[in-house]
Image (cartoon, helix red, strand yellow):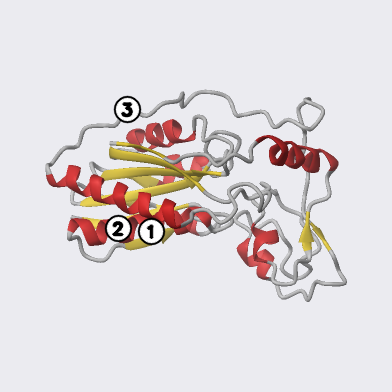
Amino acid sequence: MNLHSLCYSGSGVTEKTVRTLMEALEKESGLAQGVFHSFRKPDERQADYSFGPDDLVIIGSPTYAGKLPNKILPDFQSRLHGNGAAAIALVTFGNRAYDNSLAELCAVLSADGFQVIAAGAFVGRHAFTDTLGEGRPDWDDLRELRAFGKAAAEKLGRKDFSKPAVPGDPDAPYYVPMGLDGQPAKFLKAKPQTDLSKCCNCGVCARRCPMGAIDPADVSRVPGLCIKCQACVRYCTHRAKYFDDPAFLSHLAMLEQNFQEPKLNETFL
């Protein structure tokens, strides 16, 4: 079989997780070196990706509000074509919960013509803050990923294409972010700000933005849709990007206050 992986990854955590799993499968399954397909940039999500019965494909996504990112979901639904390919569904989550994201990804892939043989939810550093999931995936997570890859390879070697029982409801509504006051935190219109005293206008934030929302000619302008993935904040080498929306900061403080205990990864075969 041919090995492929494809993922949407705003801040880079999901890509690291998917690549580690692909490396494990290369080692444990005897498959040739896999091909990684990025689904991050807008133009990458305009292409169609077709696979077939001779392919094994790892599909990865971060969890946004307990589900798949709502602005990326239509691209997962319309651009991926399994045609009987085996698939491993993988989601990452920022130490709160993955809720229904893994169930949703499995449902989307099945509808796209993939045979989902394995699925996993792995903790990664939260996009909003370093204090949740700090340093993850760490060495223990990477070891679990490799063990998961080995188990999936063994299942595939037995020609077992049974679908794993994954918890969650793919049709459930999104998680409602809450603030410190216990009320819904509404920050859909929040956009990154720029500290002009630090910004050198290098444009890395505009290049990393998965929505193409930042003006490359003047990166302090964000005329497009912001999905709060924090890619611009994470990849700014001068730390010039930040969010100051009160509702966003209240939700961030609530997360830091209530979700410090390290969560466990979960896998399904």
Residue under label 1, please give it.
20
First in sequence: mark 3 or mark 2?
A: 2
Q: Is residue 47 visible?
A: no
Distance CA(mark 2)–CA(mark 1): 6 Å
- Residue at 49% from the left image edge and 24% from the top image edge: 171
Question: Relative to the observer, which residue lies in front, 117 or 151?
Answer: 151
Q: Secondary structure at mark 2?
A: helix
* Residue ranking furthest to the right: 197
The percent position of residue 100, horizontal first and vertical second, equals 49, 30
Distance CA(mark 3)–CA(mark 2): 23 Å
- Residue at 16% from the left image edge and 37% from the top image edge: 160
The percent position of residue 13, horizontal first and vertical second, equals 52, 55
Would residue 137 appear left or right of 257 to someone viewing this image? left
Q: How many discs mark residues in the rendered view?
A: 3
Q: Which label number is shown at residue 165?
A: 3
The percent position of residue 184, horizontal first and vertical second, equals 76, 27
Badges 2 and 1: C-beta atoms under 8 Å apart? yes
